[in-house]
Amino acid sequence: MSGFAERFAALRAEIAAEARACGRDPQSIRILGVSKRQPASAIIEAAAAGLTAIGENYVQEAKEKFAQLPPLEKHFIGHVQTNKAKQLVALFDVVQSVDRADAAVALGNAAARAGRVLPVLVQLNISPAERFGCPPDEADALAETIRAQAALRLDGVMAIGPITEDRSETERAFALAAKTFARLGGSTLSIGMSGDWREAIRAGSTMVRIGTALFGERRYD
Ligand SMILES: *Cc1c(COP(=O)(O)O)cnc(C)c1O
């Protein structure tokens, strides 16, 4: 087995065990492999090991790598800039990071022009250290704006947990995300990363976004 295949198998087993421990069906939790700052070769290895969906944060980096990849479901999880809406629609299957009305309108217009329906998630801000994301009490208004876009389909909620050693703080933040997801509806509650996926699964996550625990350290060069 390759390094990725071993880490992937181990992580899947741990996720399944955590799911069962809290009475959940392991099949109800998908793994998104977060491949930002990883070379295309690492993603090709991941796809060969059975990874079916990846997340990227930067448009230019994604564009360069995607040309080299086998078929994979591609999620955008970075900050949405309205002037990149057309490229996002061309490159990605899902945009998880819609956090304000002008991003929703720009993506809605770009998807309509491309003649497709783009599934999106509302990115919530549940952590004081996070720069982006919609405050939970403004999420209903943003959901309305998204639903008014014929070429967008609101499919749930994404959030980044707080950077903290305090597990109860993480639990409170994820509970807030889960509560907002229950109100907005959709099929996807995208919470949980390499350091906090256990708390996320206990809070009801249906998609964990895992970078370093699968791909190793990111390369900044
Ligand atoms: C980088 C990133 C991840 C993955 O983080 P890891 O801690 O490496 O698992 C998940 N979600 C978002 C939005 C990210 O930017």
Image (cartoon, rainbow, N blue to C red):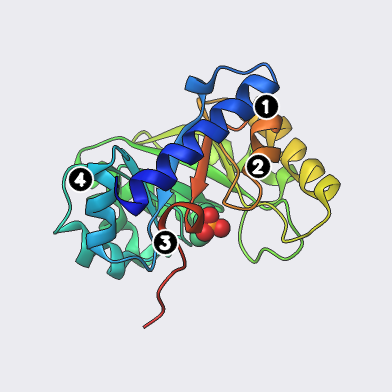
Q: Quick one: which residue is furthest to the bottom in this view?
A: 221
Residue at image location 14% in from the left, 59% down from the top: 67
Query: What amino acid type should be assigned to the residue bearing mark 2?
Result: Ala
Lower position in the chain sequence, tag 3 or tag 1: 3
Which quadrant holds the C terminus? bottom left
Residue to which mark 2 is pinned: 139
Secondary structure category for the residue under label 2:
helix
Q: Which amino acid type is marked by label 3?
A: Asn
The disc labelled 1 sits on which kind of residue? Arg
**CA gap, disc 2 and disc 1:** 9 Å
Image check: 9 left or right of 39?
A: right
Front disc: 3 or 4: 3
| Residue drawn at the location 72% of the way across and 44% of the way down | 136
Tell me whether the residue at label 4 lies in contact with that at label 2, contact meaning CB atoms closer than 8 angstroms. no
Mark found first going from the N terminus, 2 or 1 = 2
Q: Which residue is mark 4?
A: 114
